[in-house]
Image: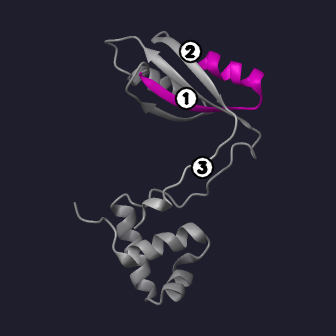
Amino acid sequence: MTNPVDELDARLLTLLEEDPHVGVLGASRRLGVARGTVQSRLDKLVARGVIRSFAPQLDPAALGYPVMAFCTLEIRQGTGGGPVVEHVAAIPEVLEAHTITGSGDLMIRVVARDNADLQRVIDLVVAHEMVERSSTVICLSTRVPYRTSPLVP
């Protein structure tokens, strides 16, 4: 497989990671290329799905949700996961949901205001009739935050 980004794309992605406010004109100046080149590269990176969003990264703790937990859900076999995924997607405190291998079927990341609120969120999650069992672990600290920049060559 060929590398999905070339050297200029990699420099542009690194710049955007380091300085999200740089803008197209600022990026063109800092990279030493034409503004149109930067815009074209951005458009292509977005079209190819390399850049998924220009939205700000929000910190749940700063928004009043300092408790984070991971829940593994076992879903009734033969039902598919669709209805449960739709159910958890409707719960605002569910930040992610992933189909997994192993003893569980779905791994979700949730946030809560405190431990009592976490119980409320878990109760909402397991209220779906197709959730057979759940297991929850509370995150004590984040040692390596979500990152993608090390993947850029």
Q: Are marks 1 and 3 in contact (CB under 8 Å)?
A: no
Under tag 3, what secondary structure? loop
Quarter where residue 152 is shown:
bottom left
Q: Check residue 120 for magenta coloring.
A: yes
Q: Left or right: where does residue 41 sit relative to residue 58?
A: left
Q: Check residue 55 for magenta coloring.
A: no
* Label annotation for residue 90: 1
Residue 33 x %, y %:
44, 88
Name the image quarter holding the C terminus.
Answer: bottom left
- Residue nearest the observer in this picture, 47 or 33: 33
- Residue nearest the observer in this picture, 153 or 45: 153
Give the distance between the C-alpha atoms of the residues marked 2 and 1, in whole angstroms. Answer: 13 Å
**Residue 128 visible at all:** no
Work out whether 18 lies above or below 34: above
Q: Which segment is the magenta one?
A: 105-125
Mark 2 or mark 3: name the one nearer the start of the chain. Answer: 2
Quarter where residue 4 is shown:
bottom left
* Label annotation for residue 126: 2
Under tag 1, what secondary structure? loop
Q: Residue furthest left?
A: 1
Q: Residues within 10 Å of mark 2 (few under 14, many from 20)?
A: some
- Residue nearest the observer in this picture, 108 or 140: 140
* Label annotation for residue 145: 3
Mark 2 or mark 1: name the one nearer the start of the chain. Answer: 1
